[in-house]
């Protein structure tokens, strides 16, 4: 028996997609299309929040699950969508011919991500993975400087195509080993060597979305070359979806996880190290955030390699708190940007004098990414490290702590530029009402989750309990 009401968040996204498409089709002004898309995104956030308690199967059993796990991640995806669309008010980094159509691709990609975190069958999961990627491929190419956008999209698509092909081959091996495409049945099939090989290959597509080593090098280039609002969405929503996908894929391994754990340990260490060391030498602020995302992918993997409820809850908590922190950083990027140009770290000089509130937003973002209290970055790393210690890998926590210390240097370099360097010839910045509200909401979320992480941790624990 079908229960279509369980599909409420997806229906809200479909409505937003149709409205955005209609605005583009009838040729409305870019601002009107933006207002319609923003209203639909806010409705999607509300619908996702109301749908948190929903449980069941909207279509067929074991194909598409609505549970605490999927609903919590859908809320994170809808929040990332709303923030990205709010930041797209200016659109000065997006080519003029695409400013009305761009929101449709946000919705298309977000719909694929929501389907991705609910999919419990391999073919459904793969189709949702591709649907979530197509919109992002187009968004990455829409920078007003066509050469920059084309390069960003080309690298993103090439990496995506390769990762998708490898994942599809892995899915074929999983089916050959388990004789089923249903994830719960695969997890109960025993974890044969062929199945584990299939899971490892399938992880290629997942690690690509997470921007983890060795499929990470697209991230700094795409962050740098995509329009600011597209980079915001890519840096937030895709990470939430990637964590959901990663947990679903890893759950197929059953009890045979030793080889997978070893692989994840290597990937986590290399992601943290490569991301942090590369970020030390960056001058472009968006490129720095790209390498920072690679490092944070390594931190996220620390929770997942424990194959426990605590580790899964830590990863979910971390990615949910990561969303508003990164939004703060990209809001500064969009506000400081002049005629769509990417801001350098030098262009942040004297930001606290040019716009005191924007300087505070940047400070919150950098402290959050570095894990400095009172932001939830500290609690997130604490939960991740606790899961690793619980799994008996204390040495791995020491490696992560060294990497976190390295990251302090380049995050504080950004803070130094904003608070200690003179503004020079850089002009004062006046925030629009939309940017002010978006900044206030994102900062409030970061501070609230930093001082009172219990509600988010409770949601993350409930989500993890579904899988463990």
Image (tube, rainbow, N blue to C red):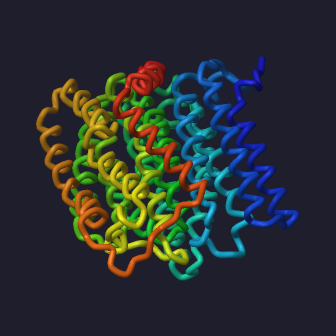
* Marker count (numbered): 0
**Residue 368 x %, y %:** 33, 45
Viewer-nearest residue: 147 or 411: 411
Left or right, residue 395 beside residue 380: left
**Residue 277 x %, y %:** 21, 62
The N terminus sits in image quarter? top right
Q: Does residue 144 sit above or below 69 in this rendering?
A: below
Residue found at x 26% / y 57%: 411
Viewer-nearest residue: 213 or 252: 213
Left or right, residue 5 beside residue 65: right
The C terminus sits in image quarter? top left
- Where on the picture, by quarter, is residue 384? top left
Residue found at x 48% / y 58%: 331
Residue found at x 64% / y 20%: 54
- Where on the picture, by quarter, is residue 401? top left
Left or right, residue 238 beside residue 309: right
**Residue 400 x %, y %:** 19, 44
Res 204 seen here: no
- Where on the picture, by quarter, is residue 303? top left
Left or right, residue 34 beside residue 460: right
Res 257 seen here: yes
**Residue 228 x %, y %:** 52, 64
């Amino acid at each position: 028996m079908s229960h279509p009401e369980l599909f409420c968040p997806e229906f809200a996204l479909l409505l937003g997609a149709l409205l955005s498409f209609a605005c583009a089709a009838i040729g409305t002004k870019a601002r009107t299309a933006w207002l319609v898309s923003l209203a639909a995104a806010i409705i999607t956030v509300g619908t996702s929040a109301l749908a948190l308690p929903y449980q069941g199967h909207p279509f067929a059993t074991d194909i598409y699950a609505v549970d605490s796990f999927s609903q919590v991640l859908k809320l994170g995806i809808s929040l990332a969508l709303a923030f990205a669309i709010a930041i797209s008010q200016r659109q000065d980094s997006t080519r003029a011919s695409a400013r009305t159509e761009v929101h449709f691709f946000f919705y298309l990609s977000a719909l694929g991500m929501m389907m991705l975190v609910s999919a419990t069958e391999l073919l459904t999961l793969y189709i949702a993975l591709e649907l979530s990627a197509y919109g992002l491929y187009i968004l990455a190419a829409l920078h007003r400087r066509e050469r920059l956008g084309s390069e960003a999209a080309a690298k993103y698509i090439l990496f995506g195509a390769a990762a998708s092909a490898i994942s599809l081959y892995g899915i074929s091996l999983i089916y050959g080993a388990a004789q089923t495409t249903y994830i719960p049945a695969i997890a109960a099939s025993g974890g044969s060597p062929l199945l584990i090989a299939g899971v490892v290959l399938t992880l290629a597509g997942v690690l690509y979305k997470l921007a983890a080593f060795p499929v990470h090098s697209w991230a700094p280039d795409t962050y740098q070359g995509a329009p600011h609002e597209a980079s915001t969405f890519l840096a937030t929503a895709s990470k939430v979806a990637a964590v959901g996908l990663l947990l679903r894929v890893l759950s197929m391994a059953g009890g045979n996880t030793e080889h997978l754990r070893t692989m994840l340990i290597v990937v986590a260490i290399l992601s943290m190290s490569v991301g942090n060391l590369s970020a030390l030498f960056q001058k472009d602020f968006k490129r720095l955030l790209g390498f920072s995302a690679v490092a944070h992918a390594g931190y996220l993997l620390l929770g997942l390699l424990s194959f426990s409820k605590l580790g899964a809850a830590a990863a979910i908590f971390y990615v949910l708190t990561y969303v508003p922190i990164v939004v703060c950083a990209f809001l500064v990027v969009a506000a400081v940007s002049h005629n769509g140009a990417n801001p350098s770290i030098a262009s942040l000089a004297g930001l606290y004098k040019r716009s005191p509130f924007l300087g505070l937003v940047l400070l919150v973002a950098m402290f959050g990414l570095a894990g400095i209290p009172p932001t939830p970055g500290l609690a997130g790393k604490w939960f991740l490290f606790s899961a690793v210690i619980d799994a008996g890998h204390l040495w791995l926590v020491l490696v992560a702590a060294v990497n976190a210390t390295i990251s302090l240097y380049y995050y504080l370099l950004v803070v130094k530029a904003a608070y200690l360097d003179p503004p020079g010839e850089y002009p004062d910045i006046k925030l629009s009402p939309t940017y002010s509200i978006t900044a206030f909401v994102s900062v409030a979320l970061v501070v609230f989750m930093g001082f009172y992480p219990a509600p988010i941790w409770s949601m993350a624990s409930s989500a993890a309990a579904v899988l463990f």
